[in-house]
Image (cartoon, rainbow, N blue to C red):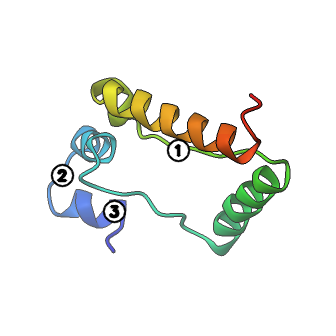
Amino acid sequence: MISRQQLIAFGLFVDAIRHRLESGRLHRYHRTAAQQTRALERDQAQYAADLTPLRFSHAQIAYGRAYVKSALSRARRRIERERGGVS
């Protein structure tokens, strides 16, 4: 794992870091235990509310629309199956 400051020290510009994050070549991790806890609590609350969280990166939405559409269709079919065909 490497910090943003270390990437800048190695010569990457902020725009280059942003591009790599959006294209999926760099992955952002929660920096603190509190951020990790909030993310887990959000996921747990959505699950408890019978919601199915799906997360897509900006790059997936911008450049991989066919994949996003397919993933959403698969998730919808699974949910409908689990609920006995009721939308």
- Spot occupied by residue 55 in the image (x, y as percentages of width and height): 52, 44
Q: State the quadrant of the N terminus.
A: bottom left
Relative side of 86 to 61, left or right: right
- Rendered residue at 16%/63% (across/down): 10
Separation of marks 3 and 2 at Cα, in angstroms: 10 Å
| Vertical comparison of 36 with 49: above or below | below
Q: Given the image, on which type of amino acid does mark 3 rest?
A: Gln
Name the outermost residue toward the front. 84
| Residue 27, image quadrant | bottom left
SS at circle 1: loop
The mark found on residue 5 in the picture is 3
Answer above or below: position of 5 versus 18: below
Residue wearing tag 2: 12
> Identity of the amino acid at label 1?
Arg
Give residue 38's quadrant in the image. bottom right
Q: Which mark is residue 55?
A: 1
Q: Amino acid at mark 2?
A: Leu
Coordinates of residue 45 in the picture (x, y in percent): 82, 55
Q: Which residue sits at x=51%, y=33%?
A: 72
Which quarter of the picture shows residue 8?
bottom left
| In contact (CB < 8 Å): disc 2 and disc 1 | no
